[in-house]
Image: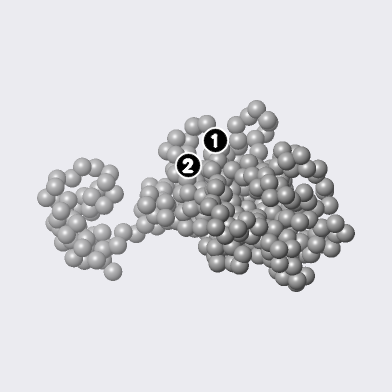
Amino acid sequence: MATMADVARSAGVSIATVSHVLNGTRPVLPHTRQAVLDAVEELGYTPNTLARSLVTARTRSIGLAVSAISNPYFTEILQGVEAEALEQGYSLLIADPHDDPAHERKVVQLLHERRVEGMIVASSPEPGELLAYLRRHEVPAVFLDRLVGPPADDAPPLFDQVCAESTEPTAGLVTHLAGLGHRRIGLVAGLPGLSTTTERITGYRHGLAAAGLPFDERILVHGDSEAAGAERATAELLNLGSRPTALITANNAMTIGALRALQAQGLSVPGDIALCCFDDFAWADLFSPRLTAVSQPSRDIGARAVRMLLDRLADPGRPTRTERLPCTFVHRTSCGCPEERNPS
């Protein structure tokens, strides 16, 4: 394997000059620079990025700690993070905290020990240990999707954050179903403690109030943000004496679980129960009926998180901020609307 010394000999320059050309650390005469680049190509020289990081204290790498990577929503966020990081010349180290606070703390420490320059995190419901570690070690970090609150109501967030709007889009699903005549609209909510769960429950209640419908705690169940939990919760909901005539699921994994529970009880959508989902996904248009959903800008969230982190690295003292990206209502037929109706 060719070394920097080999490149220097081939180009007839010093090792320091080769370093300046490859790292852009000092201007070099055009003909000298070209001689170095020609030698690099001829010898097939590959810079030792690990050795470079030891000298410059920069690894040009980002840590990503996201649970449920198999979830299509987080998969799309990962694609957005990866594409933007690559565009900006950064590599990505990925870990799955499994929504477990203790494991979350461990994987973030491992990423930190790998000398990533900053981290992008979707936190667990109890991120106290994680936050303490990041603050103690002054690790630049951006939280995505799942937000962490400020220390006081009027204070800025602890870290930069980016997510989709949750409250108003969920209220919009309730309004849509109420407009179709439904008076008992159930919600399969996510894992308690997550900001997304809290905000979607808030939106659900706002939508009920706007439609003049009472809140009934019996038809709000928690599917814990995953399919198996949603299947169990939906089955319980369907066994009520007065079950809902419409259902909202608060993420795409729980939509799958709810559909399984409905199928197990021989119920059809939307004939027996209307269904709307928070989270669109690639095959939602292939279901029969086609799933009416709120679509989150998942790839944009991932890309924006990278840009926010790079802003933080460039200016560590800048004020922290929370950015919310708008969602889109994707109108299909599982809500009970006819096929020919245009999306709104």
Q: Identify which residue, 298 or 156, lies in the foreground.
A: 298
Residue 110 percent across, percent down from the top left: 57, 56
Residue 49 lies, with reference to residue 148, above or below; the image says below
- Residue 321: image tag: 1
The residue lying at 17 percent from left, 51 percent from top is 33
Residue 307 position within the rendered picture, expressed as x and y whole percent measured from the top left: 44, 44
Name the quadrant containing residue 69: bottom right
Q: How is the image coloured?
A: one colour
Q: Report which residue position mark 2 lands on.
A: 308
Q: Residue at x 82, y 58 (%)?
A: 243
Instruction: Name the kind of residue labelled 1 in the image.
Output: Arg
In this picture, residue 296 sits left or right of residue 1: right
Is residue 315 placed above or below 30 in the rendered structure? Answer: above
**Residue at 26% across, 63% down:** 45
Tag 2: Cα neighbours inside 10 Å, few (<14), some, or many (≥20)? many
- At which x and y percent is residue 38? 16, 59
Q: Left or right: where does residue 295 sit relative to residue 44?
A: right
Residue neighbourhood size for the residue with mark 1, other residues' Cα within 10 Å, grouped as few (<14), some (14–19), many (≥20): some
